[in-house]
Image (spheres, rainbow, N blue to C red):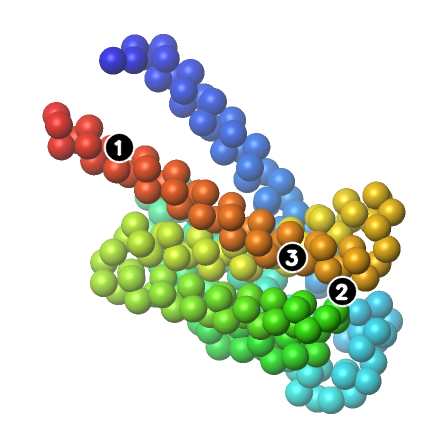
Amino acid sequence: MPNSRQLTLQSSVRYFFTALFWIPVVFFSLLLVKNTIPYFSFSQHFSFIEERAILFLKPIYKYSFYTHIFAGMFCIIAALTQFSSYILKKRKSIHIWMGKIYVFVVIVLGAPTGLYMSFFAKGSFWERTLFMFMAMYWMYSTVKGLQLIKQKNVLAHKNWMIRSYSMAMTAVTFRIYHILFYYYGVDHLHNYEISLWISVLGNMLVAEYFIFRKSKNYLNTFKINYTN
């Protein structure tokens, strides 16, 4: 059996890598929120809006855009509270209510507007299809997470909410990849397409890795408790 010193070292290493993951996640999430807020001045002088000036003449597209960026901004911040062990243990009511609001915002606002806007997304047929998939998978994983917590299946609920969060976070990871490829001199259109695919597929893989690790740790804990 490992001694207390080894356990302390293992715990310190685990906390270090946890911090190494979450610090940039929180930083870039807050940066995205900061960069999104100016859109609510409703100025037309943003490159995204200028590129789609004709689409923004349609009220349904315009309202969908502002609804979608509000939903995405809120979901990214709300989701950060959902993965806090302190809030879950000490302030469970915050976890529950923020979770309910997150689910509502995804199902009613974020995913439907994202699906609508996907039909007009920049890029080829495959990029538009990917946006459609993102919206539907975000909706499905969120609904699945809600159903499972109602059935008191906490572990499966966490797994599906990790998948839901991975879709919300594509807004953050896409921008990180886009900046990196820009500095490597990749032209705008290819940068856009590559960053989008890496962001979506990468986030899904990272989510599945975390789910695998959490499930493995849960099984190991169960075995230890059962054998003891």
Q: Earlier in the sequence, mark 3 or mark 2?
A: 2
Q: Which mark is residue 38?
A: 2
User: Would you say residue 192 is visible in this rendering?
Assistant: yes
Horizontal relation, residue 11 to residue 40: left or right: left
Q: Quadrant of residue 193?
A: bottom right
Q: Is residue 55 left or right of residue 114?
A: right
User: Which marked residue is nearer to the observer: mark 1 or mark 3?
Assistant: 3
- Name which residue type carries label 1: Asn
**SS at mark 2 in the image:** helix
Q: Residue at coordinates 85% horizontally, 74% vertically from top-left?
A: 50
Circle 1 residue:
220
**Residue at the location (79% across, 69% down)?**
48
Question: Which element is circle 1 on?
Answer: helix
Q: Which mark's residue is nearer the viewer, 3 or 2?
A: 3
The disc placed on residue 197 is: 3
* Residue 219 place in picture, x, y as percent: 26, 37
Q: Position of residue 23 (x, y in %)?
A: 59, 38
